[in-house]
Amino acid sequence: MTSTYTVVPYESGAWPGAWPEPLRRTAPPEVLERWGAVDRSPHAPRLVVAPGGGGAALLTARPGTAYVKIVDAVGDVPAAVGAVLSYAYEQGLAQVKWEGWTAGPEDAAAAGFAPLRLPLTHGQEAEGPGAGYVRWLYEGGDGVAEPPPYYRQSTHFTCGAVTALAAQAHAGVEAVESLDREAELTLWRDATNFAACEPVGLGVAVRRRWPSSPVEVYLDTDGPVLLDHLSGDEREWRAVLQRASRAEAGRLGVPVEARRLSVAGIRDAVGRREHVLLLVSLATMQGFDVPHWVLCHGAVPGAVVVDDPWFTTAAGESWVDAHLLPVPDGSLDAMSLVGQERGGDFRGAVRIGGRGGAGVR
């Protein structure tokens, strides 16, 4: 593939009033307005320009991941997308995504992109694109067959419940149409340690809701977790609840392994068509060290494929970023060390047993 292209850093604070002349000639005003409407700087925005300057694309990506996202391609769109693909291959990325603001299914298909499944919460996220597309870049692969449904958490604290529901919907254990806010909040209420869901409590809640699903918790500490920001009585009563969750796990037969689940172990699990709810820090991907649950459901060469129930619209993210998100093995390993900046240093995961027809190619 031809690798001739130019990369221009996108200066989101300066360019809305001073776009380069070639870009102003080719990009519709509404596209330039959208590009400048949010601060995309956390995701390293850049313009990739095709040879001769006839086409260009605005790219962004979460730090610590193995993809880039085309926000829009303008001018000679096939040339712009070809330049992006050359750039992505040279960067060794696993995937290119394309938001469907201006891209239609015909343009996407002509460039080798497949449509992404629309999120279940799309109606609540009117600011997001009405379509999205993906192209996997590793040789001979097309990513994850039959991806899970994407549902964005409706609160700042229900990520654990959403990942569990999405996993079970993907497995065919939970009806996809039942994944809604009532289900989200009901499962969170059963799993919460107020306000977060810690690993043992989440595993116990999964077993109670779906008694026939095999569940195993991995937590490499025997003390209370996710409480470093609290002190005194506020910390102690939550620690009591965590001890109660461990006792309940014993009564329900939920194994609690006092060790970490390695990235190799995650790959093995998803290879067996299982799901892993993984607790990670958002320090790398979002810039703040907040514990957060993601769903690991697939693997491609060099990366684990996750669905993240959260995305940050203020930084220009959409569901296209968070769905089918490839995270390099090393990055995922580092992210799974939670509480590092607050002295916590633990790893937690919940593995939910096998599913039927969905799998990784």
Image (cartoon, rainbow, N blue to C red):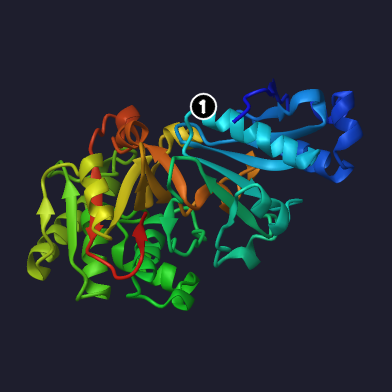
The N terminus - image quarter: top right
Q: Within the image, what quadrant is residue 159 found in?
A: bottom left
Determine if residue 99 is in view. yes
**Which structural element holds mark 1?**
loop
Across and down, in percent, residue 192 comes to: 32, 60
**Picture quarter with the C terminus:** bottom left
Residue at image point 52% right, 36% down: 62
What amino acid is at disc 1?
Answer: Gln
Percent x, y of residue 138: 44, 40
Which quadrant holds residue 297? bottom left
In this view of the protein, which residue sits in the foreground, 257 or 142?
Answer: 142
Picture coordinates of residue 229, whole percent (x, y): 34, 38
**Nearest the camera: 54 or 237?**
54
> Where residue 231 appears, x then y in whole percent?
28, 40
Name the side, left or right, on which 198 lies relative to 107.
left
Q: Is residue 75 above or below residue 98?
A: above
Residue displayed at 81% across by 43% down: 31
State the residue position of label 1: 91
